[in-house]
Every structure is written in C-alpha cells, then in structure tokens.
Amino acid sequence: MVAPSHEVTQLLKAWTTGDERALEKLTPLVYEQLRRVAQHHMAGQRPGHILQTTALVNEVYLQLLDCGQMNWQDRAHFFAMSAQLMRRILIDFARSRGSQKRGGDAVHVSLDEAPSVSKEPDPNLVALDDALKELAAVDERKSKVVELRFFGGLSVEETAAVLKVSPETVMRDWRLAKLWLLRELSEGNRRGA
C-alpha cells in the first residue's frame, strides 16, 4: 500500500518540528517503498551479495535519523534523500570490498555461510558510480535524474517535482543520460576498466 503523498508530507513536516509520534506513524508508510527500491537494487547485485535488502533499508533509515532536523519539503524530497543515501551505502560497500587486503580485514564466517559471502566488489556498481560522477561534471541535472529514478525509484512526476522541471524535461534527461552512461560504460569495458 502506498500512502497518499500529502499524508507523508504532513508527517515529514511534523517530524521536522520534533514530533516523535509523527516519525512512528511515518515509518510504516515509507518502509515498504524503501524496501521495494532496495530490492530493486539488490536484484542487480551478484548472487551471494553480503549486504541484504533489509540491512540496506535499515542503514538508510538510521542515516535518515542522523540527519537531525532536516527540513523536509515533501514526500519526493524524502525519497530523493533516501535515494542518495542508498547510492552512497551501496557504492561505499562496493568500494570497501574492493580495497580490503588479504588477512586482517577478512570476514570470519562459519563453513555454512562461506559459499554465500563474496569479497569481490561489484565492478558494475562502481563503474556506474564513476560514470555518474563524470556525468554530473558535464550535466548535474541529468545525473540527478538518474540518481532519483534509478537509485530512488521515483516516478517521472516525482523526479520533476524534486528538480522543479517538467515531466517532459525529466524524460528527455533520462533518455540522454542513459545513452551517455551506456557509452561511458561501454568505453570503460573496452579499455579494460
């Protein structure tokens, strides 16, 4: 069940003013959408990825709580921030897995768990993040569109509201950004990156 946008917005604004009961009411309303977005991202990961959907949502939730008195504008703003946090968590996780050395940072697991733990970073996610950073240097709005739609799971209309542009502009940016990223990622694969 997706909560009405105005209800989520009202609860976000109440939470901003320090109303803890608003947070209690808000959590179940946004949790399922955050979980769906996290499932979407985790489905794109290699089998046996050590980070699970629930852990990703919980980490996002904890970081949102740490934001303190964020001045939430509306539901779209909340999910845009959630998208940024989810992206950072996934990228940080992928990069940290790639930078660990043998031995000292080894994860200790039982023999039953061993087949499901992967120490390799997800090269696709890291490459996507690098390409998005390059896109942001060229066209920040197109990069934001990708972040909001791909990492945040926002609709075209919600993305337009966050960026204060028309849905048509979002669709145009989305198409161009996908083409740009495809080219960048393809060139990176040819170069062996």
Image (tube, rainbow, N blue to C red):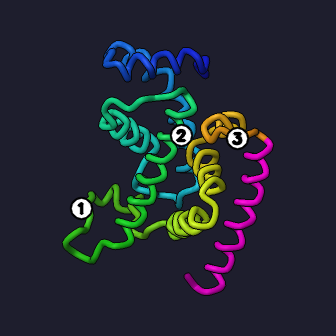
| Residue on which disc 2 sits | 80
Q: Position of residue 37 (x, y in %)?
A: 56, 40
Residue 67: image quadrant is top left
User: Please, is residue 9 above or below residue 68 in the view?
Assistant: above
Total labels drawn: 3
Given residues 49 and 72, the one toward you in this image is 72
Q: Amino acid at mark 1?
A: His
Q: Is residue 191 left or right of residue 49?
A: right
| Residue on which disc 1 sits | 108
User: Please, is residue 33 above or below residue 191 in the view?
Assistant: above
Report the quarter where the N terminus lies.
Answer: top right
Q: Which one is in front in this view, the residue at disc 2 or the one at disc 1?
A: 2
Residue at left offset 66%, top offset 73%: 184
Residue range in magenta is: 168-193
Q: Amino acid at mark 2?
A: Ala
| Residue on which disc 3 sits | 165
N-terminal-most mark, 3 or 2? 2
Q: Is residue 79 left or right of residue 105?
A: right
User: Does residue 183 show up magenta in the picture?
Assistant: yes
Residue at left offset 61%, top offset 17%: 4
Q: Badge 2: how crowded within 10 Å, few (<14), some, or many (20+)? A: many
